[in-house]
Amino acid sequence: MKSNIIVQPVAFVRNNRKSPTDDYWGDVLSRIELTDDLPTESLDGIDQFSHLEIVFFMDQSTNTITGSEHPRENPNWPKTGIFAQRKKDRPNHIGLTIVKLIGVENRAIVVSGLDAIDNTPVLDIKPVFREYLPDEEVKQPAWSHDLMKDYWKKKS
């Protein structure tokens, strides 16, 4: 059974990244501004956390992949299903990233480590609790390390 789910943005990303490119996110600072319908108090206490999870909608993604393909279309990496990748061209175009909280500015938060472009709608903001993180080794295939080698590097 398939049903529609309606969600509204809680905030929007403001940063200097204008296009959805894959690498060099390391020097991007983002300001996440609450929508007008949410009270400022929704951010009360968030400054007590070092990291947040940002759930966002990749609204500028133009393709949808439901099967498998090579990550970043690189034939040197194995063909894998969309749910074995973190590609933007997903069935629901939902992104999730753990970010570092830099500060709170009235109705906005400033973060580093967010790989969402300017004007991206934010669906949710959650504090990171260590207890929700894996308490065991995280396993991933070797190709994924190669794919990510420049992802969080600074562009300069």
Image (cartoon, helix red, strand yellow):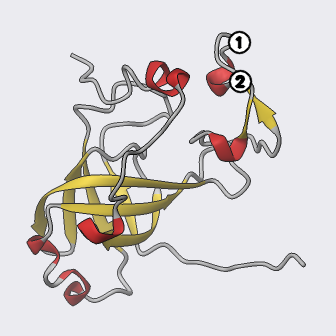
The residue positioned 49% from the left and 22% from the top of the image is: 147
Q: Residue furthest right?
A: 1
Quadrant, the C terminus:
top left
- Looking at the image, residue 122 sits to the left or right of residue 6; the answer is left
Q: Which mark is residue 70?
A: 2
User: Mark 2 belongs to which amino acid?
Assistant: His
**Distance (Cα) linking label 1 and label 2:** 6 Å
Quick one: SS at disc 1?
A: loop
Q: Nearer the viewer, residue 22 or 108?
A: 22
From the top left corner, tell me how far across and down residue 112 is, in percent. 22, 46
Q: Is residue 122 above or below residue 48?
A: above
Q: Residue at x 62, y 24 (%)?
A: 72
Please tell me whether residue 106 is drawn above or below residue 84 in the rendered image. below
Residue 37 appears left or right of 101:
right
* Whether label 1 touches label 2, CB < 8 Å: yes
Find residue 154 and report its horizontal and vertical position in percent: 24, 23
The N terminus lies in quadrant: bottom right
Picture quadrant of residue 10: bottom left
At horizontal 60% and vertical 46% (from top left) the residue drawn is: 60
Which of the pair 144/137 is nearer the observer? 137
Residue 137 x %, y %: 37, 46
Left or right side of 65 for 19: left
Amino acid beneath label 1 = Pro
Q: Residue at x 59, y 53 (%)?
A: 59
Q: Classify residue 129 as left or right of residue 71.
A: left
Q: Position of residue 99 (x, y in %)?
A: 27, 53
* Extreme-front residue of the structure: 136
In the image, is residue 123 above or below residue 154? below
Please give the residue where the numbered disc 1 appears in the rendered image.
75
SS type, badge 2: loop
Relative to 119, residue 63 above or below: above
Dot 2, crowdedness within 10 Å: few (<14), some or many (≥20)?
Answer: some
